[in-house]
Amino acid sequence: MEPGEGPPRPRIDINADIGESFGIYRTGSDELLLRSITSCSIACGFHAGDPSVMRSTVRLAARAGVAVGAHPGFADLAGFGRREINADPGQITDLV
């Protein structure tokens, strides 16, 4: 360590689930939220989101310098992925 330098500052990742709009239905303010987070988990189209929303959300995150991850879910748009879905491990692997 150089004189006058302290220990390295810890880094904190602030993550949010985004990209949950679907078709004409808009959910949340992803562009505003991207100003305050360091990584995001984008809805993968089963419980929320759709291919167009996923594509545009990835682009928004890239422009904002935010790391992108996936937020998979059950095929349950009506229940927003919050209902119990009986699926075997192979089906779950396919969804992810």
Image (cartoon, grey):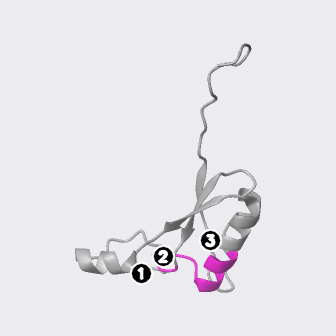
85, 37: nearer the viewer: 37
Q: Amino acid at mark 2?
A: His
SS at mark 2 in the image: loop
Q: CA distance from mark 2 to mark 1?
A: 6 Å
User: Residue 47 — which label?
Assistant: 2
The spot of residue 12 in percent (x, y) is 59, 40
Residue 24's x, y, as percent?
69, 85
Amino acid carrying mark 3 in the image:
Gly
Mark 1 and mark 2 in contact (Cβ < 8 Å)? yes
Residue 4: which quarter of the image?
A: top right
The amino acid at mark 1 is Ala
| Secondary structure state at the residue bearing disc 3 | loop
Q: Is residue 29 visible?
A: no
Magenta span contains residue 38: no
Residue at left offset 25%, top offset 79%: 90
Among the two numbered marks 2 and 3 on one chain, the one whose residue lies closer to the N terminus: 3
From the top left corner, tell me how far across and down residue 49 is, in percent.
Answer: 58, 78
Assign a secondary structure to mark 1: loop
Q: Is residue 45 left or right of residue 6?
A: left
Residue shown at 22% from the left, 77% from the top: 88
- Residue at the disc numbered 1: 75
- Range of magenta residues: 45-56
